[in-house]
């Protein structure tokens, strides 16, 4: 029996394209997978006193950071935070800004998680609940979730965009209906109205150094 | 069979005319399928045109977010600085002390009692905003919490899904009526507000049952107790803003404006 060559090629093309499906196929799945990974990390550190043990705390934060790097489109977040001022930054300054922005976010966010860990007994899925998803277009969507913490329910919504290489990624977070990126946008707008990009970078550096002191200040 | 064909492609000399046509057709089909299945493979963050288009779309979304006029900025910044000192050196330590002395469940319970007693204000504002159903939900919530929640200490109404209307105050009513937010104002002690919200606060004051307590001194004590009870969560919110902020004044201003806008929209 002869398989026509064109059919064989069609088959080959289909197989070649399949690996793309390994990426999260919906925005909701992407957030769900991320939350699952974060809770897993929490569980694996649940026996250790992170406030006391600096080494462990460092490893914990590093693990969370690499999870976050995959799902957060940090560069786009910074670009949107700077708005039209992004173009005023040289390429090197842009890289520096992304770097510092990630540190401001992660230092504060992870420190709060370490604090929160002390007060939570078990890290189950019902701590964080995904409540819905709205797809605005083929490339923009919102995933809504609720975090239950100290008897309060805090709505946290993820604004997502679909990227060809990375799949669905987060470009903004709304905590209690306040957009993080809009908030940074207003701050940078105010600063860059009166300061140069380099001065803003210096300010970010100060913030990172001051923010880390005293307990998170770790020498490599 | 497949491999023999492949060899034939590699050495075109052995192919007959008809085979050439078949191979060309097959290759074209292959290309079309690739093109259809993987539209516009953008390569990196900023280079490819499709990602650029998406970014300018996002940029437009962000740029269209409303802001608030701040002609009083020099004065506001002074008050902001004063408040920051007051919070940092007085109110945050007080909040920490209270937090340590009063465990979370008790704070929650006390907060619930005040929230429950305050239902008339929310009820009236729902009505003024043309939402009678929400107004009824407030009454039902009050009755349920008072009867089955030990006078409002617990909040059983919260777990009933068809209850629980969004929290509304007089400022949101003015917003619903189409009155603009006016200028941004930072009040001493109270913190961020707008002209509209400030007018709303006067309305809320008269809709507050505590205002109608005949024993004036008791009224003040209760108001003080409520503010003390709310202090830990208010102060930790402020601390968060400061921790994440690069320019705290703008951060608090924008956070307040966004929060109020959503409260009106709900």
Image (cartoon, rainbow, N blue to C red):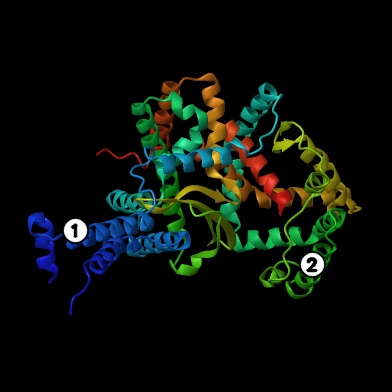
Residue at 73%, 49% (x, y): give it: B264
Is residue B226 rendered to the left or right of residue B12? right
Which of the 4 image quadrants contains residue B252? top right
Is residue B197 rendered to the left or right of residue A2? right
Of A88 and A50, nearer the camera is A88
Residue B149's x, y, as percent? 73, 72
Residue lying at the far right in this picture: please name it. B214
Callout 1: residue from which chain? Answer: B
- One can see residue B118 in this view: yes
Residue A89's x, y, as percent? 41, 25
Of B164 and A10, nearer the camera is A10
Tell me the CA gap for discs 1 and 2. 77 Å
Whether residue B158 is situated above or below residue B219 in the rendered picture: below
Instruction: Say which quadrant the N terminus of chain B sits in.
Output: bottom left
- One can see residue A213 in this view: no
Under circle 2, the secondary element is helix
Q: From the viewer's perspective, is the residue at label 1 or at label 2 nearer?
A: 1
Q: Which mark is residue B137?
A: 2
Whether residue B253 is situated above or below residue A171 in the rendered picture: above
Residue at 79%, 44% (x, y): give it: B175
Discs 1 and 2 share one subunit = yes
Under circle 1, the secondary element is helix
Residue A119's x, y, as percent? 47, 60
Q: Which mark is residue B20?
A: 1
């Amino acid at each position: 029996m002869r398989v026509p060559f064109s059919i064989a090629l069609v088959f080959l093309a289909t197989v070649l394209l399949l690996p793309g499906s390994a990426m999260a196929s919906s925005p909701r799945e992407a957030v769900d997978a991320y939350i699952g990974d974060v809770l897993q990390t929490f569980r694996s550190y649940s026996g250790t006193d992170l406030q006391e043990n600096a080494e462990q705390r460092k490893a914990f934060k590093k693990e969370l950071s690499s999870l976050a790097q995959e799902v957060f489109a940090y560069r786009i977040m910074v670009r949107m935070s700077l708005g039209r001022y992004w173009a005023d930054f040289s390429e090197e300054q842009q890289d520096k800004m992304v770097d510092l922005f990630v540190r401001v976010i992660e230092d504060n966010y992870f420190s709060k998680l370490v604090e929160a860990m002390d007060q939570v007994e078990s890290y189950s899925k019902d701590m964080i609940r995904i409540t819905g998803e709205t797809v605005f277009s083929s490339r923009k969507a919102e995933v809504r979730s609720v975090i239950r913490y100290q008897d309060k329910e805090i709505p946290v919504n993820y604004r997502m965009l679909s990227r060809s290489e990375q799949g669905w990624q987060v470009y903004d977070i709304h905590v209690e209906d306040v957009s993080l990126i809009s908030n940074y946008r207003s701050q940078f707008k105010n600063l860059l109205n009166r300061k140069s990009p380099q001065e803003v970078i210096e300010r970010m550096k100060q913030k990172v150094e001051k923010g880390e002191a005293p307990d998170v200040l770790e020498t490599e | 069979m497949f491999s023999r064909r492949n060899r034939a492609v590699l050495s075109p000399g052995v192919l007959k005319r008809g085979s050439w046509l078949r191979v060309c057709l097959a290759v074209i089909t292959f290309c079309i399928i690739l093109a259809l299945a993987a539209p516009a493979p953008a390569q990196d963050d900023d280079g490819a045109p499709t990602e650029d288009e998406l970014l300018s779309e996002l940029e437009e979304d962000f740029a269209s977010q409303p802001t608030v006029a701040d002609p009083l900025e020099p004065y506001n910044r002074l008050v902001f600085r004063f408040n920051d000192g007051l919070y940092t050196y007085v109110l945050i330590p007080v909040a920490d002390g209270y937090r340590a002395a009063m465990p979370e469940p008790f704070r929650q319970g006390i907060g619930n009692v005040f929230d429950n007693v305050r239902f008339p204000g929310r009820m009236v504002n729902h009505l003024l905003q043309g939402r009678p159903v929400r107004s009824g939900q407030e009454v039902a919530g009050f009755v349920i919490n008072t009867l089955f929640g030990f006078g409002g200490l617990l909040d059983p109404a919260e777990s009933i899904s068809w209850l629980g209307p969004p929290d509304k105050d007089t400022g949101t009513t003015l917003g619903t009526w189409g009155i603009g937010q006016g200028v941004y104002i930072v009040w001493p002690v109270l913190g961020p507000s707008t002209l509209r919200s400030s007018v709303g606060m006067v309305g809320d004051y008269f809709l507050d049952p505590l205002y109608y307590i005949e024993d004036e001194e008791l009224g003040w004590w209760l108001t003080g107790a409520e503010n003390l009870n709310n202090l830990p969560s208010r102060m930790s919110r402020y601390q968060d803003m400061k921790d994440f902020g690069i320019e705290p004044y703008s951060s608090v201003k924008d956070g307040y404006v966004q929060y109020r806008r959503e409260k009106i929209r709900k």
